[in-house]
Each structure stands twice: as C-alpha cells, then as structure tokens.
Amino acid sequence: MAQATPLEGLTAIVTGAGRGLGRAEAVELARLGAAVVVNDLGQPGRDGTGDASAAPAEEVAAEIRAAGGRAVAHLGDVADFAQARALVQRAVETYGQLDILVNNAGILRDRMVFSMSEDEWDSVIRVHLKGHFNTTHFAAAHWRARAKAAGGPVHGRIVNTSSEAFLAGSAGQPNYAAAKGGIVGLTTSTALALAKYGVTANVICPRARTRMTEDVFAGVPAHGEGGAPGEGKVDPLAPEHVSPLVGYLASPAAAQVNGQLLVVHGGMVAIVERPRIAAKFDTVKESFSYEELDGLLTPYYAERPPDETFAAAEVLSLGRG
C-alpha cells in the first residue's frame, strides 16, 4: 500500500466492521490508503444477543495489516454515548485525527407491528438510530473544532447506512424501517449543519448477503444465474459490490456529494431523489370540507396506477443493510 491512493493520510472509523458489509468497507478504505479503526461489539447473534467479543474486529484489523495497511480494533457499543466518544478518541489518539466515519453497526429483531414488544422496538432504534447519532455527534464536534482551529474547512466524510425497507416498507420490520428512515433524516440534517466545515454526510441503502440477510437471500444464487463456484461468476449480492461506493464517498473526489441517498448492490448505483409533489388540490372555498375532499381524492386514487414504490415493497425490503 505504499503507492499513493485517494485516502492516503486519512483516518476512518467503520462501525460494525467485524463481519459482512462493515468488514468489506473497512478493507476497501484501507486498500485506498486510509488508516482504519475497526469497531465491532462482536456479539454472535444478529439480534444483538450473546457475549461481546473482540475477536471479529481484531481479525479484520489483522487482515488489513497483513495486506500492508494500518488498522486497530475497537470493542465497543456505538449505542452507548460514552463508548461512542471513546471510539472517536481512539481514532484521534492513534492516528492524530479522524477524517471518515462509516456507520454500519446494526441488529435485527423482526416482528409484525401487532406482535412486537417494547424491547424489540427500543433495542433496534437504539443500535441503529441512536448509534448513528452518537458517533456522528462526536465526529462532528471533532471536525468543528479542527475547522475553527484551522480557520477554514477540513476533510470530513460521513457515510451512513439506511435500507430500502424504509423506502417501501417491510411488513415484519416496523422497528428497522423506522430506524432506517430516521437515519436518512439525521443524515440530511447533518449534511446541512456541517457543510460549512468541509464535511459531507451521505447515506446508502445497500443490498448484500450477510448474516443479517442470510434468510432473506437464501433463494438467490450466490454465483449468478446458473453459475457455480469456479465458473468465474461473482455473487451479485457480495458486500464487495457496496464497498467501492463507500470508498468514493469518503474521498476528496466526492466533495460536492452531500445529503444524498444512494441505493447500491450488484454493480448498480441509483441516486434517489427527495420526495416530490405528485398532485395538488386547492379548495374552492375558504377551507376544505369532507365532501369536497371526497370528490377530489377518491377519484384521484381510484384512477391512479398502483404506486410503484409501494407495489415493490416485497422486493425492496430485501435490501436490509
């Protein structure tokens, strides 16, 4: 990794990087030249259960170092405010500063809304949404202080992880879909707040075959249609399809990309526009009555083609990040 690369001299944190998407992202950022703090709580259950273990993060950090890169492991729960602070401090103390934050850590506790317990709701919101906020808070404070000391913008990049489940709904994941929608709102607000400091914040909706999605993608061929290992075909849902976009968004080349939502999987990147008005109705009186709304909205929805986004919910909900 001695050759000059886009992220040379920069430091990155990747949360939930002991496995799956986070691991692929950490390895890619290191390949592009960044020093990486590999964060993971190391619990064996995708629902966030089991004893914490430093082993997954340590293994990824060792893999990066074996390839000639720089990496340290961090065992910590990003949903804990103090531990998120310690994570950012670890990056600054080890490498001098923080330049890139990739929020990926998450858990699943799926249940239909009428069966979901309070704990199942709270735990998913805590890890996904609060976890994204905690690390963002401390990274943003670090960049703001650096920008003030430097008297101008610094290089700061946030890449957050949402899911298509928030776009189209996911019947058995009300907690997950709500958290992922909240992450988009957090990202766009952060993008506006930090732009003057040279910091960008973007959010991706990835599809990838990981332990989080092992049941969802069980029927999708791992080596392309009709393919098999050794035939030169690449798994269309490999996490390595996602990590190059994260590397790009973390780089100086993406300085003009801010507050954006991108869907990525299997050699495809789609840029999602913010919601636009589909139709508009004005009352002919001072205010609407029930009868007037019935006369306007009922025929509108009766004649309108099925909502493509909503109709695609079953397919798009496969995009659990």
Image (cartoon, grey):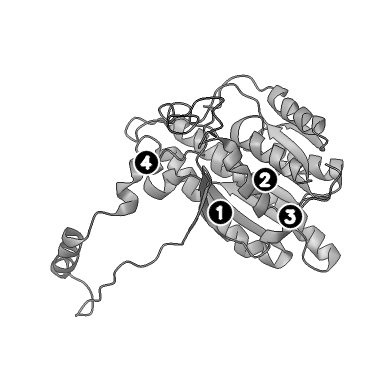
Mark before the other along the chain sequence, 4 or 2? 2
Residue 178 in the image: above or below residue 155 = above
Q: Badge 3 is on which residue?
A: 141
Q: Badge 4 is on which residue?
A: 315
Mark before the other along the chain sequence, 1 or 4? 1
Mark before the other along the chain sequence, 3 or 1? 3
Q: How far apart are marks 3 and 1 (CA)?
A: 15 Å
Q: How far apart are marks 4 and 2 (CA)?
A: 31 Å
Q: Distance between the residues labelled 1 and 2?
A: 12 Å
Amino acid type indicated by mark 2: Thr
Element at label 3: helix
Task: Point out which mark residue 135 bears.
Answer: 2
Residue 251: give x, y in percent of width and height: 71, 55
Q: Distance between the residues labelled 1 and 4?
A: 25 Å
| Residues marked 4 and 2 touching at CB (< 8 Å) | no
Amino acid type indicated by mark 1: Leu
